[in-house]
Amino acid sequence: MQAGDTLYICGTHLYKDDSGRWGKPTDIDMVSGSPGNEITIRGDCPGDEGIVWGHIIVSHQAWQSEGSNTYSIPIALGTYGGWVIEDINGTSYTKLTKRNSIQEVKDNPGSYYAATYGTGDTFYVHCTDDGDPTDRIALARNGWNFNYPPNGQYITMSNLKLYGHYALGWNTVANNSHLTWRNCVFHIVPGWDGFGIYDGNHYFTWENCIIEYTRTGIYTVSNTDNAPSHCIVRNCTVRECGTSDHVAPTGDYHGIAFQGGHDNLIEYNEVYNCSEGIGFYLDEPMSFYNNTVRYNYVHDLVPSKPTGGYGIWFSKDSMIDFSGKILSGNKVYENILVGNGNRGGRGIAWGYPDVLDCYNNVIYNFDRALLVGISDNYVTGMGINFKNNIIHTAGRYYMWADFGRAYDPGEYSIVSDNNIFYPGTGNMFYFSDKAETTTTDFSGWQTLSKPNCVFDPNSFVTDPMFIDVNNLDFNLQNTSPAIDAGIAVGLTLDFAGNPIPVGNAPDIGAYEYQGSIICIKGDLNCDGVVDIADIIIVATDFGKTSGFDTRADTDSNDEVDIFDIVFVASRFS
């Protein structure tokens, strides 16, 4: 290929190893494009989609019978990251279960075992159908692999499915730029990270991609002040992080994470079934500025430890020297963050000595909804602008502001206003600096007085009246107190892409109320069509005479019954 060329990859590519030289014949060395003449690799040949497997069919020796439908073969090159699968056919396969002994494998079809998974170790398999594993078993190591060139640039992958690749991060290659992955599926990445992008790589874009079944979805890993910058992660789905069978748990099961860097944009993504959603980490050499996190939906967090589960977090090395670093211009707005209620989980956590702009987010069901502050590594300037946010259902604290060991009054700033907190019971606000420490209720929080600080004089403790909080619909009802109760912060579009403001002022929360909607009869969720979603609203509460979704009681007789089913069903479609 030459700069400006397009390569279509057609059909399923799966390497069968007959030699035991895993990895030698399967490297695909790519060439560089140039501005206006990018290299494009596509997988959307009509009728023959491109699927490239990083798994390898194990065939370097004959499988030996061990009895009880169990077979063995020596591992040619270890170790690997799990995900032993059988019978690959395009994108379909069967995942086998890791066991702890040979006897367990013999007793359980669809399983495997090795003592160390190292080179020369004996590998045992019991197929799901009790059959012979010859030419059926694939290991997650050294199949087809794309190698980006040093100093490579202007290379795009589009509409391609990469399955079972041990690692998608070209982390040993520096000085790449303008690499793009668009409409791709990255399924099963059993190595350390889905994408582990190291120092010196800039202007990377992931757009409309699915990254799933890996340890970390996208992770820029830096050791210098040349951290990946000018990167975009847009409209991607990142899910099931922390799923390898053999990589030891470390807690780094992030959906999207950046170490240092600047001018990075993370927007319109959905992150779920990961330990943490979207995170940033700062080490000694790094600066961190002009990064934006907006319009993301983080939910169903599955922490790798009992106290885990962060929505959007900014952490640091414990002894970092912040002096002289650029840390300004970072923004977090219009995100919806749904926690799991675990103790220690945090919705948004900010710990850098500069000001974070944090606007119009919904933070639901975290132990500490907002954590801001730093209790070591003294540098003045820590602060947050926290406006137009809704915090609903916190385990222990709505606000945790900790400047206890580091800051005197006047050396930090909290400007928090036009927010809604619900429900409002208990001492849910924590504040600490060198002068005082207090745990208080909302009224006590409002009476705090510190230089450079505003403690929610125009905020409310009230039900924001979401459409359906139990089903995580955070749109506002027409009587919501959040409507027109916000303050202008420069935003023009809400989470759904609707204009801001509608009415006299911006609304509080991630959705701007768009005015009264007249729904057709039977359209219980007001989405413009009577369909199965409306039937489900009735069926979910069928038979209830209290505690039901009021939309399900179509005839207002205080019971969800057969008449309500008929009312919706008769207007179906």
Image (tube, helix red, strand yellow):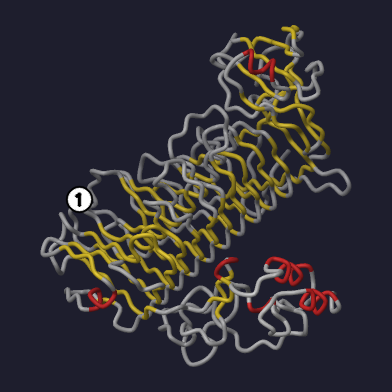
Residue 526, compared with residue 89, is above or below; it is below
**Residue 204's x, y, as percent?**
55, 50
Give the amino acid at mark 1. Answer: Asp
* Numbered circles on residues, count: 1
Q: In which quarter of the image is the N terminus?
A: top right
**Residue 51's x, y, as percent?**
77, 39
Image quadrant of residue 101?
A: top right
Secondary structure beneath label 1: loop
Image quadrant of residue 511?
A: bottom right
The residue carrying mark 1 is 376
Side (left or right) of 195 relative to 384:
right
Seen from the viewer's position, the closer of residues 444 and 400 is 444
Seen from the viewer's position, the closer of residues 242 and 1 is 242
Give the residue displayed 60% in from the left and 66% down from the top: 471
Seen from the viewer's position, the closer of residues 408 and 158 is 408
Give the residue displayed 53% in from the left and 38% down from the top: 193
